[in-house]
Image (cartoon, rainbow, N blue to C red):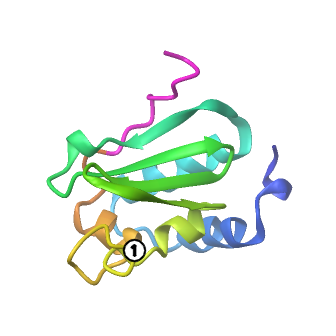
């Protein structure tokens, strides 16, 4: 996969974020996730955030190149989306994952990406 193969929404998101990072952790998140989406296939899934690493017990898993599953430890209905843009725009209250009216992007920003992992690709473990 190359940059020209990113879905339009993700390509635009990555370009926009280059000039709008609010922290070094946010820059690291977008740079590493972009690299993964462009170059690293995962057939066994890539754990981006474990439910064990945050008080809300949310998890984020990357599938193949740019699909994502977002869920919560005790909620059986996961959200499966086709790109990072869609994952970050999930309203966590509307999806039933949290009581807060907040999207995943705002939630990650509030935490300054605490708990996010970049080396948990199950293909490599």
Q: Nearer the viewer, residue 46 or 72?
A: 72
Magenta part of the chain: 116-125
Does residue 109 lie above or below 114 as drawn? below
What residue appears at the point 76 percent right and 64 percent down from the top-left corner?
7
Residue 12 image position (x, y, % from top left): 69, 73
The reply to whether residue 68 is visible in this rendering is yes
The residue lying furthest to the right in this view is 4
- Left-right relation of 72 to 99: right
Residue 118 on the magenta span? yes
> Horizontal placement of 59 versus 118: left or right?
left
Q: Which residue is mark 1?
A: 95
Q: Is 101 located above or below residue 106 in the figure?
A: below
Q: Nearer the viewer, residue 69 or 78?
A: 78
Could you say which quadrant of the image residue 98 lies in? bottom left
Give the tally of numbered discs: 1
110 relative to 61, above or below: below
Q: Position of residue 75 (x, y in %)?
A: 31, 57
Task: Kindly identify the residue that appears in the image at 22 percent across and 79 percent down.
Answer: 100
Q: Is residue 74 rendered magenta in the image?
A: no
Q: Position of residue 64 (x, y in %)?
A: 68, 41
Residue furthest top as drawn = 125
Residue 82 relative to residue 88: left or right: right
In what quadrant of the picture does the N terminus appear? top right
């Amino acid at each position: 996969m190359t940059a020209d193969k990113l879905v339009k929404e993700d390509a635009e998101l990555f370009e926009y974020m280059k000039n709008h990072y609010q922290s070094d952790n946010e820059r690291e998140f977008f740079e590493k996730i972009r690299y993964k989406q462009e170059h690293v296939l995962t057939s066994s899934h890539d754990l981006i955030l474990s439910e064990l690493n945050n008080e809300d017990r949310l998890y984020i898993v990357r599938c193949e190149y740019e699909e994502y599953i977002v869920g919560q430890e005790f909620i059986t209905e996961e959200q499966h989306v086709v790109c990072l843009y869609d994952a970050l725009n999930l309203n966590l209250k509307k999806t039933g994952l949290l009581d807060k009216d907040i999207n995943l992007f705002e939630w990650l920003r509030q935490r300054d990406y605490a708990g996010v992992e970049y080396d948990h690709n199950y293909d490599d473990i």
